[in-house]
Image: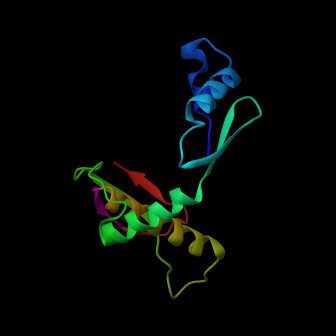
Amino acid sequence: MSVNVAMMLAKQSKKAPRAIAEDIQGAMQSDALIEKIDIAGPGFLNFTFAPTFWQATVGVVQEAGEAYGSSDMGKGTKVQVEYVSANPTGPLHIGHGRGTALGDSLTRILEKAGYDLSRPNITSTTPVVRC
């Protein structure tokens, strides 16, 4: 996993991003679930998780079953995601497949987060989200 949190905190903390990254690296180095933390460029942190992290995650996923990844972040907030549905009477192109896959994935994620979704059919190949 790669994060840029050190660069995001630089202005607020009045420290160089790399120095912040080094502080985070030092504070998290002893975490048994992290195998290593590398600092790249101006302050990106690259985390490599230990095998024990992944092994524990499998158990959590199995225990949660279909509920894994669900949240109430959206709390029933209405969201409309418009994305393409292929018209079987017209020519298809790669954009139809991309738009459909992206739109369907986005709606499934939003539903899992508790949003109240509507999906009108449109002809655009780029998903549009309206809240």
- Would you say 5 lies left or right of 56 here? right
Range of magenta residues: 114-119
What residue is drawn where x is 32% and y is 62%?
111
Front residue of 76/10: it is: 10
In the image, what residue occupies the spot 61% across and 24% down?
23
| Residue 131 coordinates in the image, percent (x, y) | 33, 48
Give how far across and how far down residue 8 sits, in percent.
58, 27
Q: Nearer the viewer, residue 108 or 56?
A: 56
* Furthest residue toward top: 14
According to the image, what is the colour scheme of the structure? rainbow
Does the magenta run of residues contain 22?
no
- The one nearer the camera, 114 or 34, is 34
Q: Give the answer, above or below, for where 120 lies relative to 8.
A: below
Point 40% across, 67% down: residue: 59
Give percent across and percent down for residue 120.
Answer: 35, 67
Left or right of 110 in this view: 101: right
Q: Is residue 115 left or right of residue 58?
A: left
Task: Indicate the position of residue 40 as horizontal and vertical percent values.
Answer: 75, 37
The residue lying at 70 percent from left, 25 percent from top is: 18
In-image side of 120 versus 24 (left or right) = left
Q: Quadrant of residue 10?
A: top right
Comparing 124 with 75, the one in front is 75
